[in-house]
Amino acid sequence: MKIIVVVSICFIGLSFAGVPLSDTPSWTSIDNDYSTGGALYDVTMDGWIDYCTGNGNDMASNKNAVYINQNGSLETTASWRSDESGYFSHIYVGDVDNDSFPDMAVAFLGFGSPNVGPTSIYRNEGNGLNTTAWWTSSDVYNSFDCAFGDVDLDGDLDLAVAAGDAYSAFQSPTRVYKNNSGVMETTPSWTSVDSSPGNACRWIDIDNDGYLDLIVGYRHKIALFKNIGGALEDSASWSTSEPGWILRIAVGDYNNDGFKDVAIACNGQLPPSDSSRIEVYTNQSGVLQTPPAFMMLKSTNFCSCVEWGDVNNDGWIDLAAGGWWEPVVVFENNAGTLDTIPTWSWNGGGNLVCETVMWGDVRNCALVAVSDYKSGDGAMKLFYFDHHPIQTFHEVLVNDTLVPPADFAYDPLTGWISFKDAPSTGSDNIEIKYTYSPYPDLGVTNWMSDIGNYLFHNTAAMIAEDDTKQPTLPGVSLLISPNPFSLKTQIALSTEYSVSFLPGVASVSSLKIYDVTGRLVKDFTRLTPNALRPTLVIWDGSDNGGRKLPNGIYLVEFNDGSTKVCDKAVITR
């Protein structure tokens, strides 16, 4: 069972044929960075996803950057820059210390063994990312990629790093740094026996056993390290040969069979005989099948990036890809069969060296808040969301009880949640609430330092935003403004009927506010339907006792008896 609540203008069931992206870039940044890593996520916690980049590559010592999203418009010059400069590469966003604020991990590529560096994490304390790295690994090496995952299922994010550099033939094993209740170990507790240079890594529950396995891309092979009861095997139990240098890996279920499949970008730059292509491996009942089910862009030279996302709201994830000095493309998924010739493409010529492709709704044109219902069995701790990437995570309940942030971890990119304690046995007793976009925009980081990064708007989202004749599902929308706030904020509620706050009247609807531990701090219980005027609730940031609450994130939840909707409010005094 699934309840869907519409929180912005969008239309469930309305899909668009083809790939509805703008023909030319809708936004281009102004910078001098060799941008490599990329993530679209709301690191400023204001309800709008920001454009994050890891910069430098093996070309120059750059600072990492965040282009702040100002009410749907990305700034062209990044206002957030890391204090550190370096030869940084790919990034990954996740809440490392379970405080509900997204943090950012950054890998360090350098150029060969003389120029190495640590992997870093920039912490978010509620006002955006700190500019100084909060954590750095004590060991240094070349690394092109990193990824958050919960290898030991203790409800916090561990960090995998694909180390070494195939370009310079510098060898180093893949690493995993464990997270112990928000404290990251500085030396890895797991390293692979294989020290071949790895340039890509992702976590994937390959066989749906509830444990995240680790897949790593090398030159001439990809390999899967199985997770056996919370511990990775030292040597990969599955691998397959490849014709080139694996630079990116993407995880998603392209055929909707319940098992996660794998797409890779295979680069042909290295001599003497490497070749380039995009490949998709089908996961059949827990085993990746060879040869790959789909191969694309075989006539290119430098495939470099790949990512899954449902661009046209047809329920089948499509595949974005790109290359160095080659077009950025999207292959449409037609009910489980991917186009092998690009359905959409943009050729930037000498102005485009793709490093990361990523999906997200920058303008909030088509956001949908959903509740995914999963069934616990008393043992399983890991569950995948029904949609990914997600735009915002709201909350999770087990048996209608809010789970505090300290007791779970989640990944917004590949879309999973892990619990510190296994949810009890029950039918649909786990409710996971989040927001996603059925019409995401496409972001592309660009290595060309004198050009800038790109964003392509989703044109179907524009149509949906303007078309008032399309049907919407009954539900509730909730708007908090200003947000963040210091003195007071207005909470506006809209349902099929209007609702007003009437003191002294028995409650039929409720508005409740929780802190990040799940503790109820404010309860507006006397809400009754009123067809004549909208609900406007003013909150001054105090609790039920009138005491001013400390700075931080608070969950605002409205319940009309049949539907719940929630959002986050941020106090910054």
Image (spheres, grey):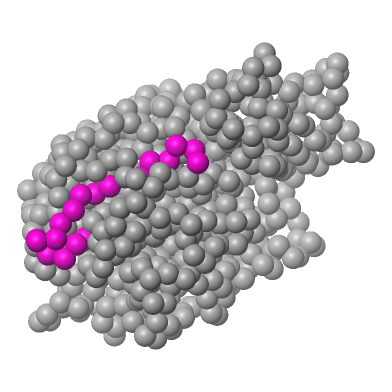
> In front here: 226 or 503?
503
**Residue at the far top in the pictured view:** 545
Q: Is residue 191 above or below residue 367?
A: above
Q: Residue at x 54, y 71 (%)?
A: 27
Q: Residue 170, percent across and down?
A: 9, 62
Query: Is there any visible trace of residue 123 in the rendered image?
Result: yes
> In front here: 85 or 237?
85
The majority secondary structure of the magenta stretch comes to: loop
Q: Residue 260, percent across and down?
A: 35, 53
Q: Residue at x 18, y 73 (%)?
A: 244
Q: Is residue 308 above or below residue 482?
A: below
Q: Which residues are magenta?
A: 109-127
Number of callouts: 0
Q: Residue at x 21, y 35 (%)?
A: 185
> In front here: 420 or 537?
537
Does residue 517 appear to the left or right of 20 in the view shown?
A: left
Q: Quadrant of the C terminus?
A: top right
**Residue at the far front in the pictured view:** 83
Hey, which quadrant is residue 190 in on the image? top left
Q: Residue 363, percent across and down?
A: 61, 59
Does residue 305 appear to the left or right of 50 in the view shown?
A: left
Does residue 525 appear to the left or right of 275 in the view shown?
A: right
Residue 422 forms part of the magenta stretch: no
Q: Quadrant of the N terminus?
A: top right
Hey, which quadrant is residue 358 in on the image? bottom left
Q: Is residue 124 above or below residue 268?
A: above
Hey, which quadrant is residue 350 in on the image? bottom left
Q: Is residue 72 above or below residue 420?
A: below
Q: Residue at x 84, y 39 (%)?
A: 534
Query: Is there any visible trace of residue 563 in the rendered image?
Result: no
